[in-house]
Amino acid sequence: MARFPQAFYARPAREVAVALLGKRLVRLLDGRRVAGIIVETEAYCDADEPDLACHGDRANQGRPTARSEIMFGPAGFAYVYFTYGMHWMFNVVTGREGKANAVLVRALEPFEGEEIIAQNRPGRRRREWTNGPARLAQALAIDKSLNGANLFAPDGVLWVEEGWTVRPEAVCVGPRVGLGQTPEPWFSMPWRFWLSGNPFVSI
Protein backbone atom coordinates (compact mmCIF):
# COMPACT_ATOMS: atom_id res chain seq x y z
CA MET A 1 0.00 0.00 0.00
CA ALA A 2 1.26 3.48 -0.89
CA ARG A 3 2.91 5.68 1.72
CA PHE A 4 1.40 9.12 2.16
CA PRO A 5 3.34 11.83 0.33
CA GLN A 6 4.93 14.82 2.01
CA ALA A 7 1.94 16.98 1.04
CA PHE A 8 -0.26 14.98 3.42
CA TYR A 9 1.78 16.32 6.35
CA ALA A 10 2.34 19.87 5.07
CA ARG A 11 -0.84 21.17 6.72
CA PRO A 12 -1.65 22.62 10.15
CA ALA A 13 -1.19 20.19 13.03
CA ARG A 14 -4.87 20.03 13.99
CA GLU A 15 -5.87 19.18 10.43
CA VAL A 16 -3.28 16.42 10.20
CA ALA A 17 -4.14 15.13 13.69
CA VAL A 18 -7.70 14.45 12.56
CA ALA A 19 -6.61 13.12 9.16
CA LEU A 20 -4.30 10.58 10.84
CA LEU A 21 -7.16 8.89 12.69
CA GLY A 22 -7.89 5.55 11.11
CA LYS A 23 -4.63 5.54 9.17
CA ARG A 24 -2.13 2.70 9.52
CA LEU A 25 1.27 3.39 11.11
CA VAL A 26 3.78 0.84 9.80
CA ARG A 27 7.21 -0.08 11.16
CA LEU A 28 9.46 -2.40 9.18
CA LEU A 29 11.42 -4.65 11.56
CA ASP A 30 13.84 -7.18 10.05
CA GLY A 31 11.81 -7.09 6.85
CA ARG A 32 8.48 -7.69 8.61
CA ARG A 33 5.60 -5.23 8.88
CA VAL A 34 4.48 -4.29 12.38
CA ALA A 35 1.52 -1.94 12.28
CA GLY A 36 -1.40 -0.41 14.08
CA ILE A 37 -4.38 1.78 13.26
CA ILE A 38 -4.02 5.27 14.69
CA VAL A 39 -6.88 5.88 17.13
CA GLU A 40 -5.68 8.91 19.14
CA THR A 41 -3.59 12.00 18.35
CA GLU A 42 -2.69 15.43 19.77
CA ALA A 43 -1.75 18.60 17.91
CA TYR A 44 1.08 20.89 19.07
CA CYS A 45 2.07 24.41 17.95
CA ASP A 46 -0.82 24.44 15.50
CA ALA A 47 -1.33 28.19 15.29
CA ASP A 48 0.97 31.15 14.72
CA GLU A 49 0.62 32.25 18.33
CA PRO A 50 2.69 30.44 20.99
CA ASP A 51 1.66 27.06 22.39
CA LEU A 52 3.30 26.69 25.78
CA ALA A 53 2.47 22.97 25.84
CA CYS A 54 4.75 22.52 22.84
CA HIS A 55 8.51 21.88 22.92
CA GLY A 56 8.92 24.29 20.02
CA ASP A 57 7.57 27.25 22.00
CA ARG A 58 7.98 26.37 25.67
CA ALA A 59 11.72 25.78 25.91
CA ASN A 60 13.22 28.56 23.81
CA GLN A 61 10.49 31.08 22.94
CA GLY A 62 9.76 29.72 19.50
CA ARG A 63 13.35 29.02 18.48
CA PRO A 64 14.80 25.55 17.82
CA THR A 65 16.83 23.72 20.42
CA ALA A 66 18.93 20.60 19.95
CA ARG A 67 15.92 18.59 21.10
CA SER A 68 13.20 20.34 19.10
CA GLU A 69 14.94 21.28 15.85
CA ILE A 70 13.21 18.49 13.91
CA MET A 71 9.87 20.16 14.68
CA PHE A 72 11.01 23.25 12.77
CA GLY A 73 12.06 21.33 9.69
CA PRO A 74 10.04 20.24 6.68
CA ALA A 75 6.85 18.27 7.15
CA GLY A 76 6.71 14.51 6.90
CA PHE A 77 9.56 13.59 9.22
CA ALA A 78 9.49 11.80 12.58
CA TYR A 79 10.12 13.74 15.77
CA VAL A 80 11.01 11.18 18.46
CA TYR A 81 11.89 12.44 21.92
CA PHE A 82 12.71 10.95 25.32
CA THR A 83 10.64 11.82 28.36
CA TYR A 84 10.45 11.00 32.08
CA GLY A 85 13.89 9.43 31.76
CA MET A 86 12.42 6.22 30.35
CA HIS A 87 9.98 6.66 27.45
CA TRP A 88 10.16 7.49 23.74
CA MET A 89 7.35 9.43 22.08
CA PHE A 90 6.59 9.44 18.35
CA ASN A 91 5.39 12.57 16.54
CA VAL A 92 4.98 13.52 12.90
CA VAL A 93 6.22 16.95 11.83
CA THR A 94 3.51 18.98 10.13
CA GLY A 95 2.92 22.50 8.83
CA ARG A 96 5.44 24.76 7.16
CA GLU A 97 9.20 24.74 7.54
CA GLY A 98 10.61 27.22 10.05
CA LYS A 99 7.66 27.03 12.49
CA ALA A 100 7.37 24.25 15.07
CA ASN A 101 4.35 22.12 14.22
CA ALA A 102 3.75 18.45 15.04
CA VAL A 103 1.26 15.75 15.93
CA LEU A 104 1.84 13.29 18.76
CA VAL A 105 0.50 9.82 17.97
CA ARG A 106 -0.99 8.72 21.29
CA ALA A 107 -2.53 5.30 20.62
CA LEU A 108 -2.85 2.52 18.06
CA GLU A 109 -5.05 -0.52 17.60
CA PRO A 110 -2.71 -3.44 16.76
CA PHE A 111 -3.19 -4.57 13.18
CA GLU A 112 -0.15 -6.48 11.86
CA GLY A 113 2.79 -8.29 13.40
CA GLU A 114 1.02 -8.89 16.68
CA GLU A 115 3.48 -11.61 17.70
CA ILE A 116 6.32 -9.06 17.46
CA ILE A 117 4.30 -6.49 19.40
CA ALA A 118 3.70 -9.08 22.11
CA GLN A 119 7.44 -9.75 22.31
CA ASN A 120 8.14 -6.01 22.62
CA ARG A 121 5.50 -5.62 25.34
CA PRO A 122 6.11 -8.75 27.44
CA GLY A 123 3.68 -9.58 30.19
CA ARG A 124 1.06 -7.10 28.95
CA ARG A 125 -2.48 -7.84 27.85
CA ARG A 126 -3.31 -7.03 24.22
CA ARG A 127 -5.40 -4.11 25.45
CA GLU A 128 -2.21 -2.61 26.98
CA TRP A 129 0.14 -3.11 24.05
CA THR A 130 -0.36 0.23 22.31
CA ASN A 131 -2.84 2.30 24.35
CA GLY A 132 -0.51 5.21 25.04
CA PRO A 133 2.33 7.05 23.30
CA ALA A 134 5.17 5.39 25.23
CA ARG A 135 3.56 1.97 24.89
CA LEU A 136 3.11 2.20 21.14
CA ALA A 137 6.69 3.39 20.71
CA GLN A 138 7.94 0.35 22.62
CA ALA A 139 5.60 -1.97 20.73
CA LEU A 140 6.86 -0.77 17.34
CA ALA A 141 10.50 -0.37 18.46
CA ILE A 142 10.47 3.39 17.82
CA ASP A 143 13.40 5.11 19.54
CA LYS A 144 16.06 7.79 19.05
CA SER A 145 17.39 6.05 15.94
CA LEU A 146 14.20 7.11 14.14
CA ASN A 147 14.30 10.77 15.15
CA GLY A 148 14.30 12.62 11.83
CA ALA A 149 13.18 9.56 9.84
CA ASN A 150 11.61 10.40 6.47
CA LEU A 151 8.01 9.14 6.59
CA PHE A 152 7.41 9.43 2.85
CA ALA A 153 10.67 7.94 1.52
CA PRO A 154 10.02 4.79 -0.55
CA ASP A 155 12.83 2.93 1.24
CA GLY A 156 12.01 4.10 4.78
CA VAL A 157 11.31 1.79 7.70
CA LEU A 158 8.53 3.91 9.24
CA TRP A 159 5.53 5.35 7.39
CA VAL A 160 1.78 6.01 7.34
CA GLU A 161 -0.64 4.53 4.81
CA GLU A 162 -4.38 4.14 4.30
CA GLY A 163 -6.31 2.21 6.90
CA TRP A 164 -9.93 2.54 7.94
CA THR A 165 -12.58 4.97 6.76
CA VAL A 166 -13.47 7.22 9.69
CA ARG A 167 -16.80 9.00 9.83
CA PRO A 168 -16.64 12.61 11.13
CA GLU A 169 -19.14 11.81 13.88
CA ALA A 170 -16.79 9.11 15.22
CA VAL A 171 -14.10 11.69 16.06
CA CYS A 172 -14.05 12.96 19.65
CA VAL A 173 -12.31 16.20 20.67
CA GLY A 174 -10.94 17.29 24.04
CA PRO A 175 -7.99 18.78 25.94
CA ARG A 176 -4.53 17.29 25.62
CA VAL A 177 -3.27 15.17 28.51
CA GLY A 178 -0.08 14.94 30.54
CA LEU A 179 0.73 18.63 30.28
CA GLY A 180 1.98 19.06 33.84
CA GLN A 181 2.13 22.72 34.89
CA THR A 182 1.33 24.15 31.45
CA PRO A 183 -0.64 27.38 32.00
CA GLU A 184 -3.98 28.26 30.54
CA PRO A 185 -5.25 28.59 27.88
CA TRP A 186 -2.84 25.99 26.48
CA PHE A 187 -3.60 23.45 29.20
CA SER A 188 -7.24 23.24 28.08
CA MET A 189 -6.88 23.65 24.32
CA PRO A 190 -9.15 21.01 22.68
CA TRP A 191 -6.38 19.65 20.49
CA ARG A 192 -6.66 15.96 21.34
CA PHE A 193 -8.59 13.74 18.94
CA TRP A 194 -9.65 10.12 19.27
CA LEU A 195 -12.03 7.50 17.86
CA SER A 196 -15.14 7.17 19.96
CA GLY A 197 -15.45 3.87 21.79
CA ASN A 198 -12.13 2.44 20.65
CA PRO A 199 -10.69 0.26 23.44
CA PHE A 200 -7.10 1.28 22.65
CA VAL A 201 -7.56 5.00 23.35
CA SER A 202 -5.16 5.90 26.17
CA ILE A 203 -7.66 7.32 28.67
Image (spheres, rainbow, N blue to C red):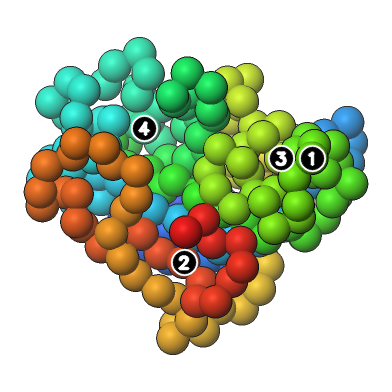
Label 1 with label 2: CB-CB less than 8 Å:
no
Q: Nearer the viewer, mark 1 or mark 3?
A: 1
Callout 2, which amino acid?
Trp
Residue at the (44%, 25%) spot, across then down:
83
Q: Secondary structure at mark 1?
A: loop
Which labelled disc corresponds to residue 194?
A: 2
Distance (Cα) linking label 4 and label 2: 22 Å
Residue position for label 4 = 71
Callout 4, which amino acid?
Met
Distance (Cα) linking label 3 and label 4: 23 Å
Which labelled disc corresponds to residue 123?
A: 1
Q: Does 200 sit above or below residue 96?
A: below
Q: Earlier in the sequence, mark 3 or mark 2?
A: 3
Callout 1, which amino acid?
Gly
Q: Secondary structure at mark 3?
A: helix
Q: Nearer the viewer, residue 124 or 36?
A: 124
Q: Earlier in the sequence, mark 1 or mark 4?
A: 4
Q: Does 174 sit above or below residue 80?
A: below
The x, y position of residue 29, in whole percent, is 82, 34
Q: Earlier in the sequence, mark 4 or mark 2?
A: 4
Distance (Cα) linking label 1 and label 3: 12 Å
